[in-house]
Image: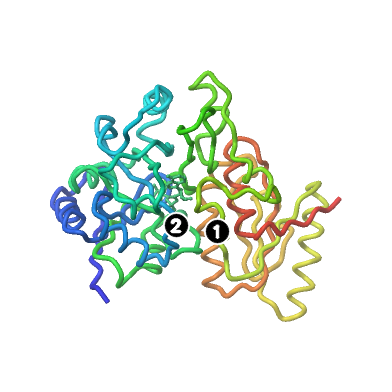
């Protein structure tokens, strides 16, 4: 057990003493969890193999699942990648700092431990000012997966990080709740056609508009039965899984509400603890042990921001069955439904 230090940092008045200390911990091979605009990250020095090994150990993460390298200045990309296509520069101009990760050819400066043995590297410049200050203080290159135990929902507040990693890492920087709540969009730029490997806040339409070309989506994401392994190794694991059995119910709104009411009543009568994921428009129809409204149905940002915290809350309440309304899969909805389907192990009930 390590004694994990805990420090509150205000993004608008950053305490440089704390950042210096956190940066030193990372330079000396230690681990610091920090806020980004997407989810909290678990940071170690991306260029030290021992740091990456410690990240995998702390998370219980499979070694073939590579880490994202976070930078704070565009110029720094040249050290970790040997080939920077024009598309990378275009996308960086448009979306960095921000919730976009690009896959590029890696340089020898990046140890194979950081990239799960791959010859490519994932790079992102986050927007959160605490993250940017920390990257600078740590020497410029922080490897950071989401700061959760592997298989749990990604952390959107520092308390989630503490639940999962207290005693396993040197420090947690608490910068308050994150703004977006879902992990960054990942785009692969190492092959002919730019391809989305993980949907996120930056949508396919936004990427196509910025590049002026068509952007593909990894086939394995579109069709679970394609028999093809996802190109982002992390996407093959059953992530974000709550302990309770989660079913997504989709169809006409009235039929969905009626089905969820019936299913939850049956489970409650059988002595189970039931949780429901719904929206402000429907919450009044339900009865269950925990009813979690994600906000207004049309407010995708609110749904994204609340999803992971709600899944964790169900675990804390020992909920055994969860029913979720399906959400639109347009725009950010693509990322929301991608995560929700993974959390449900693709268990979806269609009603009419
Ligand atoms: O928003 C985010 O991206 C957050 C914050 C902390 O920045 N990080 C994050 O990291 O979500 P993680 O480790 O939870 O997810 C990284 C994903 C995994 O699915 C991994 O397989 C994929 O990125 N990945 C990393 N390097 C890759 C590479 N070279 N080729 C393909 N996929 C890669
Ligand atoms: Mg993760």
Left or right of 228 in this view: 65: left
Tell me what residue is drawn at x 38 percent, y 37 percent: 105
What is the count of numbered marks? Answer: 2
Tell me what residue is drawn at x 28 percent, y 43 percent: 108
Spot the residue most to the bottom.
271
Dot 2 falls on a residue whose secondary structure is loop
Q: CA distance from mark 1 to mark 2?
A: 11 Å
Local crowd size for mark 2, using a 10 Å CA cut-off: few (<14), some (14–19), many (≥20):
some
Seen in the picture, residue 46 relative to 259 is either above or below; the reply is above
Left or right of 273 in this view: 131: left
Q: Position of residue 233 (x, y in %)?
A: 50, 52
Left or right of 224 in this view: 233: left
Seen in the picture, residue 38 relative to 74 is either above or below; the reply is below
Spot the residue most to the right.
352
- Quarter of the N terminus within the rendering: bottom left
Label 2, ligand 1: CB separation under 8 Å:
no
Seen in the picture, residue 126 relative to 257 is either above or below; the reply is above
Label 1, ligand 1: CB separation under 8 Å:
no
Q: Position of residue 59 (x, y in %)?
A: 39, 65
Tell me what residue is drawn at x 33 percent, y 42 percent: 128
Quadrant of residue 219 within the rendered picture? top right
Which of pointers 1 and 2 indicates the residue nearer the eye? Answer: 2
Tell me what residue is drawn at x 28 percent, y 66 percent: 169
Local crowd size for mark 1, using a 10 Å CA cut-off: few (<14), some (14–19), many (≥20):
some
Which residue bears the numbered disc 2?
64
Spot the residue most to the top.
212
Which residue bears the numbered disc 1?
237
Residue 128, labelled with which disc? none
Quadrant of residue 22 within the rendered picture? bottom left
Camera-nearest residue between 114 and 177: 114
Q: Which of pointers 1 and 2 lies earlier in the amino acid sequence?
A: 2
């Amino acid at each position: 057990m390590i004694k994990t230090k805990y420090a509150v940092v205000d993004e608008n008045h950053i305490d440089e003493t704390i950042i210096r200390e956190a940066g030193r911990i990372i330079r000396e091979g230690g681990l610091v969890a920090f806020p980004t605009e997407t989810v909290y990250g678990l940071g170690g020095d991306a260029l030290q193999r021992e740091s990456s090994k410690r990240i995998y150990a702390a998370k219980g993460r499979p070694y073939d699942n590579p880490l994202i390298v976070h930078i704070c200045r565009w110029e720094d990309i040249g050290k970790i990648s040997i080939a920077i296509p024009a598309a990378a520069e275009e996308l960086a101009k448009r979306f960095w700092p921000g919730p976009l990760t690009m896959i590029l050819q890696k340089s020898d400066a990046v140890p194979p431990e950081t990239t799960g043995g791959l010859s490519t590297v994932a790079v992102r410049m986050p927007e959160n000012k605490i993250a940017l200050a920390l990257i600078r203080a740590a020497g410029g290159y922080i490897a950071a997966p989401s700061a959760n135990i592997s298989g749990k929902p990604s952390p959107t507040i520092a308390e989630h990080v503490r639940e999962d990693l207290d005693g396993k890492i040197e420090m947690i920087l608490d910068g308050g709740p994150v703004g977006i709540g879902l992990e960054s969009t990942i785009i692969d730029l190492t092959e002919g056609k730019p391809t989305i490997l993980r949907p996120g806040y930056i949508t396919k339409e936004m990427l196509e508009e910025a590049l002026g070309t068509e952007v593909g989506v990894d086939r394995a994401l579109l069709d679970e039965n394609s028999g093809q392994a996802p190109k982002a190794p992390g996407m093959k694991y059953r992530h974000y899984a709550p302990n309770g059995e989660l079913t997504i119910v989709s169809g006409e709104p009235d039929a969905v509400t009626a089905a969820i009411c019936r299913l939850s009543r049956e489970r409650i009568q059988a002595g189970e603890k039931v949780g429901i994921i719904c929206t402000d428009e429907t919450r009044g129809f339900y009865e269950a042990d925990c009813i979690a409204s994600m906000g207004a149905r049309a407010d995708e940002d609110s749904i994204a921001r609340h999803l992971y915290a709600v899944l964790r809350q169900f675990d804390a309440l020992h909920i055994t069955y969860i029913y979720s309304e399906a959400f639109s899969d347009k725009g950010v909805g693509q990322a929301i439904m991608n995560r929700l389907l993974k959390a449900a192990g693709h268990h979806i009930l269609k009603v009419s």
